[in-house]
Image (cartoon, helix red, strand yellow):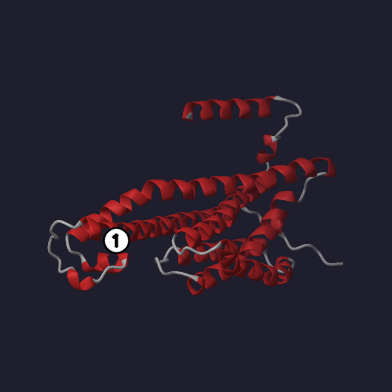
Amino acid sequence: LFAICAASGALTIYYCLSRPRPFVDLTKFRHRAFAVGSVLSFILGMGLYGSTYAVAVFLGLVRGHTPLEIGAIMMVAGVAQLVAAPVAALFESRFDGRIIIAFGYALFAAGLFLNGLSTAHSDYDNFFWPQILRGVAIMLCILPTTRLAMENWTPEETADASALFNLMRNLGGAIGIALIDTILEQRTPTHATQLIDRLQAGDAGTAALVGLPTQYFHGHAMGPIAPSIRAFIEPLIQRAAMVQSFNEAWMVLGALFVLSLLAVPFVRGRDVAPPKVI
């Protein structure tokens, strides 16, 4: 499957670059401003869609909330985005776009890193500030990157450029969600095995992490476990392992946002200059 994906991808790129009017005009990436803006849009899509997906799945699988309860908790990010939109538009028209991009992506990364400190008991209060940070950061990320990518195109070129720019954000979201699912699927069993090993070694800290009474763990190897106790402990271990995998996923997304800041020096001041007010 990987070979088929690589071959078909290479063939698609070849056709897009060799045809006079390709369905996807990849030659637009030759323009540095558009290429940098598209990369930033790709990373934003990973964080925007990925974090929304991860929070919803965490609240459903770990906390056991209903869809209505999940929606009520996640509403915070939407409210923050609505409140921040006019402020972001004001900043975007008055300040250097590079500063806004750097601040917006750093703020989004901070929200992801805060989510990466979640526990099995994290709920509305623990998700409040991370969602506030990401909700405010979204508009600070979108406005200057959109201007960076979409300015300086002719009216005939704007439609294709806009479609490709939006495609990059949606593609980032798809890959971000796939990345989160991959981490959850592949890392959770590993974390569960490590937790079991530490519990069998009598580690009190691991017992507290899982949610077991710590007075029975004294740093000594545990003996055989009765089937009834094993049936009680296994769901707790699985939940704790899943939380660790979620934290890894949020940390990976946050690290990608930090790495995206390396693209800011490639943005020229005139590419994101505030529009002149007549």
Q: Is 275 left or right of 242, judged from the image as shown?
A: right
- x and y, in percent, of residue 255 in the image: 46, 56
Task: Classify residue 264 by image quadrant.
Answer: bottom right
Left or right, 142 with reference to 188: right
Identity of the residue drawn at 34% across and 58% down: 235
- 209 lies above or below 186: below
Counting every numbered tag in the picture gives: 1
Q: Nearer the viewer, residue 163 or 235?
A: 235
Image quarter in which the C terminus is found = bottom right
State the residue in front, 234 or 110: 234
Q: As displayed, is residue 45 above or below residue 84? A: above
Q: How far across and down, in percent of the image, does residue 182 sit?
A: 45, 45
Q: Residue drawn 14% across and 56% down?
A: 224
| Residue 254 placement (x, y as % from top left) | 49, 58
Query: Pointer 1: what residue?
Result: 232
Q: Amino acid at mark 1?
A: Phe
The relative height of residue 149 versus residue 16 in the rendered view (above or below) is below
Determine whether the residue tagged by mark 1 lies in a helix, strand or loop.
helix
How many residues crowd mark 1 within 10 Å: few (<14), some (14–19), many (20+)? few
Of residue 1 and residue 47, the one placed in the foreground of this image is 1
Where in the figure is residue 67, as x and y percent of width and height?
57, 61
276 relative position to 137: left or right: right
